[in-house]
Image (tube, rainbow, N blue to C red):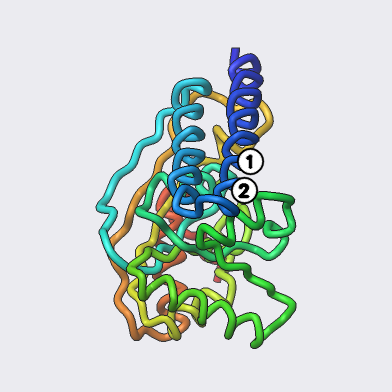
Amino acid sequence: MHVLRSLIFYVAFYGGSVFHVLGAMIALRVAPRWLRPICDAWSGWHHWCVENLLGIRIEITGINPKGVALFAIKHESFFEAIEVPHLFNHPAGFAKQELFDIPGWGKVAAAYGAIPVARDEGAKALRTMLKDARMHIAAGRPMIIFPEGTRVPPGQRPELQAGFAALYKMLKLPVIPVAVESGRVYETMWKRPGVIRVHFGEPIETGLSREEIEDRTRAAINIFNGPQETPDA
């Protein structure tokens, strides 16, 4: 049954995505004010398909604060990346450069507020990222980052990417850690009914050292993965 559900999901979601992307591309040229509602509708369509076609319940706990902060999100699957516009009020966020090379989607994402992370360009890329981020912060938009840098299999707790602490220090924003447990039911070809859990943790203040902000954020986004293993003495 879950195979049939998955097939229906793929046809419905990706078929609908074609129309959303085409609509957004047209909006970019003739009616920019429609870009945001189209992108938000795409994320909302995905949310509906996950719950109603896949039979996956999305459980959200904790407090999602309003206003500007740096939301650090656990990344187990494509689910949370697509869910971001549905969870937040017109978010802007950091995404790897390769995603902006996707025909159509890349231009739409950049116009919506996604900021490319060009890891091979070093300080130059960081300056561009900071400039774009500060523009969005001035507009009151929440900032989104996946501090692990890429999707991580369930149960793993990798070190955070160095750029996360650098952005935290330079943007001077509190961090809201967001734990996500999505990989076990979503990050597979034949998706299974179950529960995706999303938990908004307590805010982490500004001004901490790199080691402390990384340790506290890493612990908070991994609450669904159990305690961190310590090496034998």
Residue 172 image offset from top left, x and y in percent: 37, 82
- Amino acid of disc 1: Leu
Residue 180 image offset from top left, x and y in percent: 45, 48
Residue 182 image offset from top left, x and y in percent: 51, 41
Quarter of the figure with residue 17: top right
Of 181 and 6, which appears nearest the observer? 6
Residue 181 image offset from top left, x and y in percent: 47, 44
- Residue that numbered label 1 is attached to: 22
Seen at 59% across and 24% down, the residue is 12
Count of numbered labels shown in the rendering: 2
Of 189 and 209, which appears nearest the observer? 189
Name of the residue lying farthest toward the front: 30
Seen at 38% across and 73% down, the residue is 137
Q: Do the numbered discs 2 and 1 sit on residues whose CB atoms are within 8 Å?
A: yes
Secondary element type, mark 2: helix
Q: Give the numbered dot on residue 25.
A: 2
Q: Indicate whether 105 appears above or below 14.
A: below
Mark 1: few, some, or many residues within 10 Å (few <14, many ≥20)? some
Seen at 41% across and 44% down, the residue is 86
Whether residue 155 is visible, yes or no, is no
Q: Indicate whether 230 appears above or below 226.
A: below
